[in-house]
Amino acid sequence: MARSGPASTGALAPTSSVRFSGIDAARGLAIIGMMAAHVWPRDDIQSELLVDGRPSMLFAVVAGVALGLVTGGADRGTVPRTTARWRLLIRAALLLALGLLLWMLPSGIAIILDYYGLMFALMLPLLFLPRPALLGVGAVLLVGAPLLRDEVVAAGAPVEQPWAATTEYLLTGYYPVLLWLPLLIAGLLCARSDLTLTRTRLLMLSLGTLTSVAGYGAAAVLPGVGAEAHSSTAAELLGSGGLAVAIIALALLLLDRPLPSRGLSIAALPLVSIGRMPLTIYTGHVLVIAGFAFLGPAGRFAPDVGIPLFIGLTIAAVLIAGTFQALRLRGPLEAAVSGLAGLAGRRGATMGA
């Protein structure tokens, strides 16, 4: 599909002493899924692939997990809150700016970075809420935001600026911020439940699976209920969001055990490496696809172009990410965003003291 796919949240990679390979692998899987969604051939432009929508929602849940990890994990009282909020605000602004720049390219991709920046900004007042409050806010948004979106669409979305852009970002766009916030909240709840515990991971796996079955099952059996990619219905959010939580849990169980299998660790290394520099890889793949726009653009590549392009993008991502990993270097965009956010965060903490 021409305008689909997830973006990177590499600017929010965990900074604590605990680094979960499973989280990085899930993030890397989302990047690979995004590449497939953008270049894999389709029978027609309206056909839906398995990788449509789901990778972007996986990335949203991973983003929520990352938010929880950089703000203390299960112990939210260990992080200076003013500093954390300033850093997140600066990262949100940088993602918004980068996203708007990427929209200017003829890639045909619905860039998600600017939407993610707004999501992060709206997560600021929720960062340190207790889990029951987070659960309540997420439930209200899950039910209420799609209803509000439907009312706005039925009444006719505004066409005057800035209200038209505001409505698109919050309710009617490809990645509507208010409708997607429950995905980030779900990830934040997971991080607040202590991801080092096996029982937390098993609970995530079971609840994620049940939620996914409930969401997609409702769309399959109930009339008028849909879960198509990018429909942002409650059914799609439950189906894809639950699937994302289950994938993250499974990755944690396999790759972050007390003594993880060496074979599994080696096999997952490409995904882990990509997941540690996703902002750079995401931006790079957009640039490449924009360069091939005369043959596409995204979602419209013929098989003899799209399949080799997907293979090439994947190999390039693995090689680039693996090289940076071997050299113990951060991705260039990840380093730049973290550096700027760190400087601004220290200044913000001083101002708030």
Image (cartoon, grey):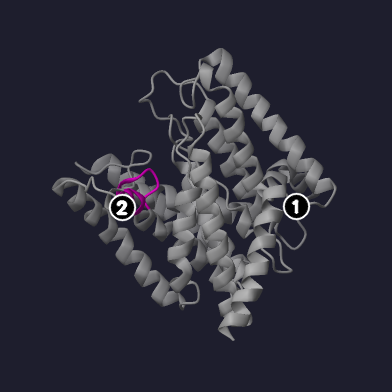
Q: Which residue is drawn at 44% across and 57% down?
A: 118
The image shows residue 188 at horizontal and vertical percentages of 51, 66
Kindly give the residue lying farthest to the right in the view shown. 327
Identify which amino acid the numbered label 1 is placed on: Arg
Left or right for 164, reference 313: left
Judging depth in this view, the residue of 199 and 11 nearest the camera is 11
Can you give x and y, in whole percent of width and height, for residue 122 in the image?
43, 64
Q: Does the magenta stretch include residue 58?
A: no
Residue reaching furthest to the top: 304
Task: Judge by depth and name the residue closer to the eye, 237 or 5.
Answer: 5
Residue with the mark numbered 1: 330
Q: In which quarter of the image is residue 340?
A: bottom right
The residue that appears at 64% across and 37% down in the rendered structure is 284
- Which residues lie in the magenta part? 165-176
Residue furthest bottom in the image: 353
The amino acid beneath tag 2 is Pro
Q: In this view, does 152 lie to the left or right of 349?
A: left
Residue 316 in sight: yes
Identified at 59% across, 52% down, the residue is 250
Q: Main secondary structure of the magenta part?
A: helix
Residue 162: mark in rendering: 2
Q: Earlier in the sequence, mark 2 or mark 1?
A: 2
In the image, residue 345 sits, relative to residue 274, either above or below, namely: below
The label shown at residue 315 is none
Q: Is residue 33 above or below residue 242?
A: above
- Work out how far the residue at label 2 is from the one at label 1, CA to CA, in angstroms: 37 Å
Tell me where residue 111 appears, x and y as whole percent.
48, 41
Residue 8 locus on image (x, y percent): 57, 48
